Structure formats: C-alpha cells, structure tokens
Amino acid sequence: MSDIDNIMKNIVSLDELGVDTSGYQISGVTMSDTFYEMYCGSCQRPDSNGDFAEDYEIGANIAQLTSSGRIGAFRWYALTTYYGTDIYKMNDARIRQNSIHRETMQRGSYSLGEMLNHAINSSDDMHSLLREPIVLNTKDIMDVREYGYLAAMQSHLENFMELPHVDIVNVQGNQIKYNWDLIRDKDVIIPFVIGSQESIKIYAEIASAICGKSKASCAIGIFITRIKPSLDGRDPKIIDLKDQIPVISESPFFTPIV
C-alpha cells in the first residue's frame, strides 16, 4: 500500500459527515500534490516523525518495489527484501520475498536495471515525490568496496530519468562538502545497494543534512535490497549479499518484463 493509499484510508468521507458531496471532487492529482507537499514539509522538520517499515504484497509481476519505510521524517524504498532464516520463522510471505530477491539477482545486470526502472515507474509514491529529481553521488561517501556498485547505480538512475550527471558532494579529508546550489529545491534521490540498519541510519544523516537547512525539497532513499532485522533489532547472520547482487547496468534500457 502506497502512502497515498494510507492518506485516503485515514480520511473520513464527507458522506459520513453528512455533507452534501455534489460540489466536491478530489482528484488523483490533488492527492498526489497533497502527499508531496506533506512529505516536503516533514523533511524540513526531520525530528517530527518516528520510524516504521513495511513489506508490500507482491503480485504476479515481480518488477515492483517490495518494501518501504521511514527513518525519522525520511522515506526509503527497496526493490527486493531479504529475510534471514536464522532470525525469522519463515512463512509464505517471507519465502516469497526471498524467492523474488534470488530471482531478481539471478537475472543479471541488465535485467536488474530494467526491473528497477519498472518498479519506479509503477510506484504511485515515486510519481508523487520525484517532481524535480537529482541523484546524490553516494559512491563518494560509502565504503570504497561499494564504489563500483554505487557509481553504476547513480549513472543508471540519471540515464533512466534523463538527468545530467552531477556530483552533489565531494569529500575533503574527513569532511563532506555539499554543493547547495545543485540541490536547492530538488527532490534528492539517495541510492544504496544494501538497506541494512547501518546504511539506513547513514541515509537519514545525509537526508537531514540536505533538508534540514531547507535547501533540498525532500530526500528519497532507494535501495536494491532491504535486509530485514528482527523485531528486537538483530541483524541476520548472512552471507555477503553483495556478492550475489550484480553491478547494475548503467544503460537506461526500459523493456517489458516477462
């Protein structure tokens, strides 16, 4: 369920309030605009919300986002979701999520890129949030072992969305310097490969830095794979998932998923 759906679910209808509805009509565009404005407002108040995460019910078409969440004010989305069998009792839904993860990664670099494209394109939330998108170069911030993955992911997203290649941050010693002119009034996509508890916290720190000073309109985290921690905060004792995840193709290919 998208956040737009959640907004609609919590609205009391005018009929229930006994109001004549003949002169009222709320369009999908209005709801999308409302969601975007609410989210941008929350990003400017980064301490105003708690954390949450949810999995989506996956239908026959696996080329879709499988989970999303929020850390503080900042929303993130994941293409696949992985449950560690050492910390979770597996049920049909979790087995399905792990199966989708394996199938997605086994398809290879080009198909991984296409599936991410389709997932973004079919997400109501993404359509609402990405008004003026720009992609942050997380490759220069994260562990050097992830450089190739994140460099390719940045290029892929820029090519897919037909955005110019830019480097929003540069690292000088131990300091991260932001190019405020590039991100002012932009919807900043912050890409990661693995959505672990640690990387999601890093995402929140980056998002807070670029939104807290009211420079960027909002921040959106996009992960290839979300690793689900246990309810008491334990991470699974997993093999190195990064070895199973292909480096995404930088090509913007967008073809039907069979």
Image (tube, rainbow, N blue to C red):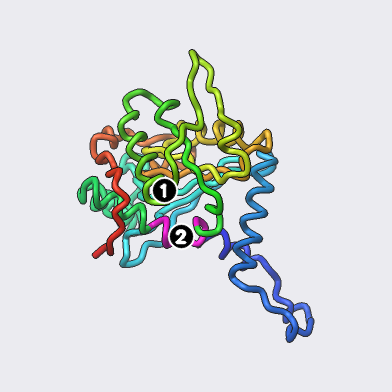
Q: Residue 167: x, y in percent?
A: 46, 32
Q: Which residues are magenta?
A: 119-126
| Whether residue 51 is visible | no
The residue at 35%/23% (across/down) is 144
Assess whether residue 173 is covered by the magenta stretch.
Answer: no
- Labels 2 and 1 touching (C-beta < 8 A): no
Q: Is residue 252 left or right of residue 103?
A: right
Q: Residues within 10 Å of mark 1 (few under 14, many from 20)?
A: many
Q: Residue 44: x, y in percent?
A: 68, 41
Q: Check disc 1 and give the amino acid type.
A: Ala
The residue at 26%/53% (across/down) is 99
Element at badge 1? strand
Q: Is residue 89 left or right of residue 239?
A: right
Element at badge 2? loop
Q: Residue 186: x, y in percent?
A: 58, 44
Compute the Cα span from label 2 to label 1. 11 Å
Q: Residue 238: x, y in percent?
A: 30, 35
Q: Nearer the viewer, residue 70 or 216?
A: 216
Q: Residues within 10 Å of mark 2 (few under 14, many from 20)?
A: some
Q: Which of the numbered marks, if any, corresponds to residue 123?
A: 2
| Whether residue 237 is visible | yes
Q: Check disc 2 and give the amino acid type.
A: Ser
Q: Nearer the viewer, residue 164 or 17?
A: 164
The secondary structure making up most of the magenta span is helix
Q: Nearer the viewer, residue 166 or 117?
A: 166
Q: In the picture, residue 234 is in which quadrant?
A: top left
The residue at 27%/40% (across/down) is 245
Q: Is residue 26 left or right of residue 51?
A: right
Query: Disc 1 marks which residue?
Result: 78
Q: Nearer the viewer, residue 232 or 12?
A: 12
Image: 57 above or below 19 = above
